[in-house]
Image: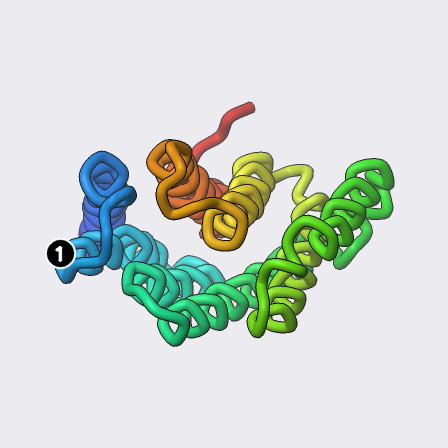
Amino acid sequence: MSILEEIALRQSFRLGFLLVGVSFALVYVVGFCYRGPSMVKTLVKAVPLLSFAAAVGVTFGHPLIILALVSSAIGDIALSRSSDKPFLVGLISFAIAHVFYIVHFWGLSGGLDGALALPVAAAALVIFALSTEVWLGPFTDEMRWPVRVYVVLITVMGLTALGLNGMPLAMFGAFAFLMSDTLLSIQLFRMSDHSVWQVPTSVVLWLLYAGGQFAILAGAGWSTPLFQIW
């Protein structure tokens, strides 16, 4: 096989994995995100992020993006189950994913220079993080400190993402991911299990989460963006 043939094959695999990931993400949002735990739900939910990771890996994308996507997939599997133990596993997995994104964004944006260049946005993000001590912390019981650590991590991830000025897709994806985390915390700790908002919240949450992860990999998964939006 020639080099050009191998490149073409790898590009085909990348497209295939991306299509599989997007397809399963759509199947999940239509038929599973608002339903209770089941083995089928877990299997469907595991596919999108693992497929995205495979798409990045098969075309020699950034290892940190691959690690973040795999960690997120583990978190997806854990959160598709019920009880406190899977939730804690999911929380840790997503925290690790945020650490990988922080390291990657830090390298791309030069640390917190982007946040310093956008002081209003950075201040708003920090104020929002601090506000969780009022509207979230008191309702988390024994999970209060793990949730606090998680809030710090997603805030730092958001601050480093502010420096991705040349990567608008990745920046959008990072904040979509942050918004999905916010909705998840509201759904888990502040919303009644019987609330009429449970289903729409689950749908919007998944769209923000899966769409955000896709945007991050499309914008910062490779040395050049998968798409150019301007």
| Residue situated in front as seen by the camera: 85 or 3 | 85
Please state the horizontal and vertical placement of residue 140, each as a whole percent of the image: 58, 63
Task: State left or right for residue 193 relative to residue 132.
Answer: left
| Residue situated in front as seen by the camera: 42 or 23 | 42
Name the residue beneath numbered marker 1: 40
Task: Examine the rendered structure and indicate whether residue 39 appears above or below residue 116.
Answer: below
Its colouring scheme is rainbow
* Residue at image point 68% right, 49% down: 135
Residue 19 lies in what quarter of the image?
Answer: top left
Task: State left or right for residue 210 relative to residue 228.
Answer: left
| Residue situated in front as seen by the camera: 90 or 50 | 90
For the N terminus, the image quarter is: bottom left
* Residue at image point 64% right, 63% down: 153
* Residue at image point 68% right, 38% down: 165
Task: Examine the rendered structure and indicate whether residue 116 appears above or below residue 62.
Answer: above
Please state the horizontal and vertical placement of residue 129, each as a whole percent of the image: 72, 52
Please state the horizontal and vertical placement of residue 195, each as a whole percent of the image: 40, 38
Residue 141 lies in what quarter of the image?
Answer: bottom right
Name the secondary structure under disc 1.
Answer: helix
Please state the horizontal and vertical placement of residue 88, each as a whole percent of the image: 45, 72
- Can see residue 167? yes
Q: Give the amino acid type for the residue marked by disc 1 in the picture.
A: Val
- Can see residue 8? no
Task: State left or right for residue 98 relative to residue 28.
Answer: right
Task: State left or right for residue 116 relative to residue 155.
Answer: right
For the C terminus, the image quarter is: top right
Disc 1: CA contacts within 10 A as few (<14), some (14-19) or many (>=20)? few
